[in-house]
Image (cartoon, helix red, strand yellow):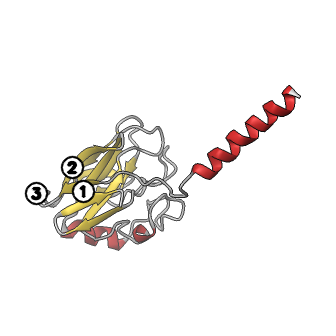
Amino acid sequence: MMMYLGFAGVVYVFISAIMSGDGEVPSVPSLRVDISDIQPEQANFLTWEGRPVLIYRRSDADVVNLRTGDSRIKDPESAGSEQPEFARNAMRSRTPDYFVAIALGTGQGCTVEHVPAADEQFQGQAWDGGFMDSCGKDRFDLAGRVYRGQYAGKNLKVPQYAIDGSMLILGR
């Protein structure tokens, strides 16, 4: 008899837990960031939901370079990348002038830093600028796409975001 009562109690708790849910999927808290002061070729870093996020404002030359294409990119179409549908384009962004990504390399998960364009050679060509993993030194272009021959296997992750005038809203 005690076993039946115990079983009934477990069933009651289980059914109560299922029925009490409101059916809504919890949303990620959003963060509003004023991007009006970010200058072309400037990267800003912030923390959102415990992760570093980079916001980079591209120059006109950056946009031209990204549209030209680069045979050194491992996944130029970002087929194996984590990004919202709006970022499935050459810029991997909502607009050509701003790039937003989780600032963690995809190899060892270390923070990335902005490395400006320079005459230094990288894989036989001048460095057009981009991002570099602080641990493994993996390099990514200004759309967060990883170069061939790097330990990192995927492009930088692009989070959900929206741009409303001079405000960038993360998590939307």
| Amino acid type assigned to the residue bearing label 3 in the image | Asp
Q: Earlier in the sequence, mark 2 or mark 1?
A: 2
Alpha-carbon span between mark 2 and mark 3: 10 Å
Callout 1 environment at 10 Å: few (<14), some (14 to 19), or many (20+)?
many
Q: Quadrant of the C terminus?
A: bottom left
> Circles 3 and 1: CB distance less than 8 Å?
no
Disc 2 secondary structure class: strand
In the rendered structure, find residue 22 and report the number of the disc placed on it.
none
Q: Residue at x 65, y 45 (%)?
A: 16
| Amino acid type assigned to the residue bearing label 1 in the image | Tyr
Outermost residue on the right side: it is 1
Alpha-carbon span between mark 2 and mark 1: 6 Å
> In which image quadrant can residue 145 be found?
bottom left
Relative to 33, say whether 4 is above or below. above
Q: Earlier in the sequence, mark 2 or mark 3?
A: 3
Point out the frontmost of discs 3 and 1. Answer: 3
Q: Residue at x 81, y 35 (%)?
A: 7
Disc 1 secondary structure class: strand
Q: Residue at x 33, y 73 (%)?
A: 67
Q: Which residue is mark 2?
A: 44
Alpha-carbon span between mark 3 and mark 1: 12 Å
In the rendered structure, find residue 37 and report the number of the disc placed on it.
3
In the rendered structure, find residue 56 and report the number of the disc placed on it.
1
> Circles 2 and 1: CB distance less than 8 Å?
yes
